[in-house]
Image (spheres, helix red, strand yellow):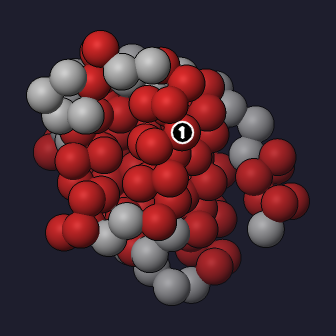
Amino acid sequence: MRHAGEQADPVKRETRLISALQNDGLYGGLSEAIDEAAEFHPPGVVKALLSGALHRDGEAAVHFAALLSFIHGKAPEPFDWNQRPFFLRFHTADRGERAAAFRELCAVIGVDPERYLRAG
């Protein structure tokens, strides 16, 4: 996908990307998936990023929050270092802290957080 992603069937590309965002580790394909999602982010990919920002491990959640800010036009690049302190709030095992950061992110990007918080 890295070299010919734009030539792949968009539905298959989206399915593979969502799977990587949901399952891959940061050094086992997730980093490449994040790079791809910065350029290719249909609704299913955005949904996977939102869910991952809330439910994935802290390292992945940090990058998902950053990428969501970029995708929604709230950051100039896929990881805006000026917003790093906020993104790092997603690196917690405390569900309440993660939910609070998620609600704040959703307010900034204009997404209803309750849909993802209820899915729990």
**Residue at the image point whose x is 21% and y is 47% from the top:** 32
Q: Is residue 100 visible?
A: yes
**Residue at the image point whose x is 42% and y is 62% from the top:** 61
Give the secondary structure at mark 1: helix
Q: Which residue is mark 1?
A: 15
**Residue at the image point whose x is 22% and y is 54% from the top:** 31
Type of the residue with mark 1: Thr
**Alpha-carbon neighbours of circle 1 within 10 Å: few (<14), some, or many (≥20)?**
some
Q: Position of residue 85 (x, y in %)?
A: 27, 58
Q: Quadrant of residue 25?
A: bottom left
Q: Nearer the viewer, residue 84 or 41?
A: 41
Q: Nearer the viewer, residue 91 or 51?
A: 51
Q: Quadrant of residue 20?
A: bottom left
Furthest residue toward right: 118
Relative to 74, is 89 above or below? below
Q: Nearer the viewer, residue 106 or 54?
A: 54
Furthest residue toward top: 7
Q: Position of residue 49 (x, y in %)?
A: 51, 46
Q: Position of residue 28 (x, y in %)?
A: 24, 68
Image quadrant for the N terminus?
top left
Image quadrant for the C terminus?
bottom right
**Residue at the image point whose x is 43% and y is 30% from the top:** 13
